[in-house]
Image (cartoon, helix red, strand yellow):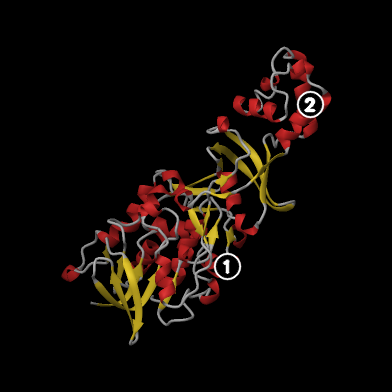
Amino acid sequence: MMYKLIIVGGGFGGLVLANRLLDKGFKDFLLLERNDRLGKKILVTGNGRCNLTNVDVSVSRYHGDNAAFCASALERFGSSELITFFAELGLVVTEEGGRFYPLSRSAASVLDCLRLRIDGAPLPDGKKLCECESKVVDIRYENGRYMLTAENGKKYQAENVVLAFGGKSGANLGTDGSGFLLAEKLGYTVTKLTPSLVQLKTSDFSKSLSGVKHKACVTLYDGDRFIATEDGDFLFVDGGVSGNAVFELSSRLSLTSRPQIKIDFIPNMTREELSSALMKKVKHFGFLPAEKLLVGYVHSALSAWIASRCGVKGIQISELTASQLSDVIACVKNCRAKIDGAFDFKASQVTHGGVSTKEVDEVTFSGKKSKGLYIVGEALDVDGDCGGFNLQWAFSSAMAAAENFI
């Protein structure tokens, strides 16, 4: 069967696009999804709560060889447009700390609103709007039409195609990076793919700290060159560090060749304030070992590790010299760790890199190398910070692409 449009990928972006087309009365399309059901990856976003967007949507929250590429789509289809879109689908959203979630706090609510008309609504003549378990493995442009072949052997034809596949993060959910091969088959350049919003590797912390979570200010450097700083959760994991502060910085890791981080474990106190507070502990708890000096300020395991790192383990608090106290404070406020890279794609939330934005029109999202091809969402070399920015990008780009058919 010949379609006016085939959408490759039934994730967030593909489903937004399909719903937008239906809103405008356009039904001559087919959505192809490789998994056995639509939107599987949506269910795990935002730790299952689905952080849809953010009050601070701006180009500065996005990354890629040319992050400014996303400006037009974000301006036309920003957070307010996303909220209105979902309200019309029957989903109520609520704000929490600048982030927007479904009122139910359940990603399943978002998926239900997006998929019900696509795989559940009755259509005349038994026509379907989507086919699952249809992984597209080949695509060609011949005689003014696109010829697509699925892994199961089925073949499809369309005048237009939208590539809305995910990146390389979350292979267990169907986003293993194979979608980029389709773009390459049509002559498009795919930039280097690296994990983003991911834990960072380091061997500078003890395994005894694994699982310890702390609010901190974390700064990324390339050698001594400042890259970025983030406040938030900092979590020690086996072989590295995690938490939303680390996730945010991981998106800038590609800007470094000698990455290291600086952690301030008590950012709401100056060195002088911390020194004054610790002198009181020396006065009242001098009989305790130095491993207990920071208990009450940081996790007890972290307090013990800092004492060990500063070489004062086993020394009574009352016997600490001024120089030793200064070393402890320096470790609290300026703890340095060398970064050995990022964890792999399996651990990452999004993919940094994708189809080069130099080869795609920033307004229409049409490919510049082939007529009737459109590329949206994570398939492009654009990725956002943690906090709803990546779903917002998928929405904005999908809405912009839909304008070509309505």
Which residue is the extreme one toward the left? 125
How many numbered marks, from 0 up? 2
Residue at the far bottom: name it. Answer: 143
Vertical position of residue 302 compared to residue 373: above or below: above
Residue 358 numbered mark, or none: none
Q: Which residue occupies the extreme top position in the image?
A: 287
Please name the residue shown 45% across and 78% down the image.
187
Residue 150 placement: quadrant: bottom left
Q: Position of residue 209 (x, y in %)?
A: 57, 31
Q: Is residue 113 left or right of residue 121?
A: right
Q: Residues within 10 Å of mark 1 (few under 14, many from 20)?
A: some
Q: CA distance from mark 2 to mark 1?
A: 51 Å
Task: Say what secondary structure mark 2 lies in.
Answer: helix
Check disc 2 and report the residue beneath it: 324
The residue nearer to you, when weighing 311 against 221, is 311
- Mark in front: 2 vs 1: 2
Residue that lies at the very extreme toward the right in this rendered image: 322
Asked whether 34 or 78 is in front, the reply is 34
Q: Which residue is mark 1?
A: 71
Residue at x-position 39% and y-position 71%: 182
Q: Looking at the figure, which quarter contains the N terminus?
A: bottom left
Q: Is residue 396 left or right of residue 123?
A: right
Q: Position of residue 316 (x, y in %)?
A: 73, 16
Query: What type is the residue that disc 1 sits on?
Result: Ala
Res 7 quadrant in image = bottom left
Against 289, is 311 above or below?
A: below
Q: In the rendered image, is residue 252 in sight?
A: no
